[in-house]
Image (spheres, rainbow, N blue to C red):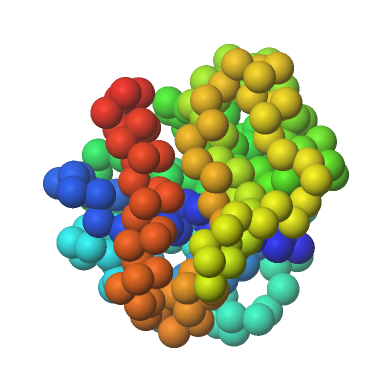
Amino acid sequence: GDFRFNVNDLIKTLDSGKALHECFSKLGKTGNGVEKNGGIKKICRIVTGAYLTFHKKNSADGNIKLMSINLMLAEKEAPVLWRGPVIAGAVKQFWSDTFWGDIDYLFVDMPPGTGDVPLTVFQSLPVNGIVIVTSPQELVQMIVKKAYNMANMMHVPVLGVVENFSYLECPDCGKKINIYDNNVDEFIKMNHVPLLAELPFNNGVSHLNNEDSISEEDTQSIKDWILPVIDYLFNDMI
């Protein structure tokens, strides 16, 4: 499994000051709790052949819509035993058979590395580009390089890199402590992609996921990390 908090969730949750309708589709990771982060506990309904999305209740303006495979399960802890072709079909249905409504942009959170899900997304959805999320560990960076090479092979732009768990900030003096020896510098220099953010360990994110609440201090800290990413993506790239 992943040892990471969801950068995509942070981007969606924070108020970026932009009057845009956001949508979020969790693909491939067959039930990793994205609906829990969104405060969603219901099962999705099908109306006139289309899946209905759920609105994320802690979004800044209430316009964030959410769809996840886990929302289709009667039991949230039930396993999803799907082979590649079935997962690929679900990816397409999340795009074509889900009632997203009038939207400006769509975030697709994909599993790490390469495989059926990113292949289907790159081939079936009108992708403007991808943001790669990594952490300063050698094994993770190898997987990230695979994803980067796959995007290049399929002519999908890599918009930038976000390094998660980049450092630990001392709560007393504010000193940055680098827990891991590896960092993303070599990767971004070699591949000429911008480093959009370096995100530290932060307990406030866990509170957001578990309790759907977060302190004002933690909220401001997360905004400081994530808003530059939003500004870059939507001012410079779109």
Q: Does any portion of residue 51 appear in the rendered image?
A: no
**Left or right of 15: which side holds 165?**
right
Residue drawn at point x = 38 percent, y = 76 percent: 214
Residue drawn at point x = 77 percent, y = 51 percent: 180
Q: Where the C terminus falls, by quadrant?
A: top left
Q: Does 208 sit above or below residue 20?
A: below
Residue 43: give x, y in percent of width and height.
44, 77
Residue drawn at point x = 70 percent, y = 26 percent: 187
Q: Nearer the viewer, residue 196 or 108?
A: 196
Q: Nearer the viewer, residue 184 or 86?
A: 184
Q: Nearer the viewer, residue 11 or 203?
A: 203
Residue 237: give x, y in percent of width and height.
35, 23
The image quadrant that residue 139 belongs to is: top right
User: Outermost residue, front direction?
Assistant: 173
Q: Does any portion of residue 213 appear in the rendered image?
A: yes
Residue 137: give x, y in percent of width and height.
79, 47
User: Outermost residue, right direction?
Assistant: 139
Residue drawn at point x = 73 percent, y = 45 percent: 136
Q: Does 34 sit above or below residue 99?
A: below
The image quadrant that residue 141 belongs to is: top right
**Left or right of 107: which side holds 160?**
right
